[in-house]
């Protein structure tokens, strides 16, 4: 049986495709891993959905605890979008910054 020899260009494209798929898989795993999240929130009750999108970020929730990677909006805007999508927020942190009681009240004003 004769072996098929691929041109160098085809081999490099195949390798680049494999790297891209591997990078995407790693990115999903990093978002789910501890430390891979930027936003951390606790809801007043368990989230209805385990994964959902609010303000262009994917939120992953387990019970009332939710995490997401960093988006481009201010923390209060991210909190409000989460509250709109999942219900009242009890605590919200963006990186090392935690929203205070006044900011949480403004965040939850989005909940109807």
Image: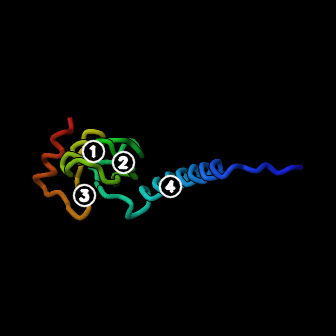
- Report the residue marked by disc 4: 23
Q: Dot 2: what SS? A: strand
Mark toward the start of the polypeptide (3 vs 2): 2
Give residue 43's mark. none
Q: Quadrant of residue 99?
A: bottom left
Q: Which residue does the image show at 19% across and 50% down from the upper left?
A: 74
* Mark 1 vs 4: CB contact within 8 A: no
Instruction: Between label 3 and label 4, give the one nearer the viewer.
Output: 4
Residue 17 in picture, x, y percent from top left: 57, 49
* Mark 3 vs 1: CB contact within 8 A: no
| Scheme by which the image is coloured | rainbow
Instruction: Between label 2 and label 4, give the one nearer the viewer.
Output: 4
Q: How many marks?
A: 4
Q: Dot 1: what SS? A: helix
Mark toward the start of the polypeptide (3 vs 1): 1
Mark toward the start of the polypeptide (3 vs 4): 4
- Report the residue marked by disc 3: 94
Taking the image as shown, residue 111 lies to the left or right of residue 28, namely left
């Amino acid at each position: 049986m004769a072996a098929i020899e691929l041109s160098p260009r085809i081999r490099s494209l195949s390798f680049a495709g494999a790297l891209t798929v591997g990078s995407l898989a790693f990115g999903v795993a990093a978002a789910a891993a501890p430390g891979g999240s930027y936003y951390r929130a606790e809801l007043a009750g368990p989230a209805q959905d385990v994964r959902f999108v609010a303000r262009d970020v994917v939120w992953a929730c387990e019970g009332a605890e939710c995490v997401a990677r960093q988006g481009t909006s201010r923390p209060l805007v991210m909190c409000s979008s989460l509250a709109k999508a999942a219900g009242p927020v009890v605590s919200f942190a963006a990186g090392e910054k935690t929203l205070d009681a006044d900011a949480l009240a403004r965040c939850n004003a989005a909940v109807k």
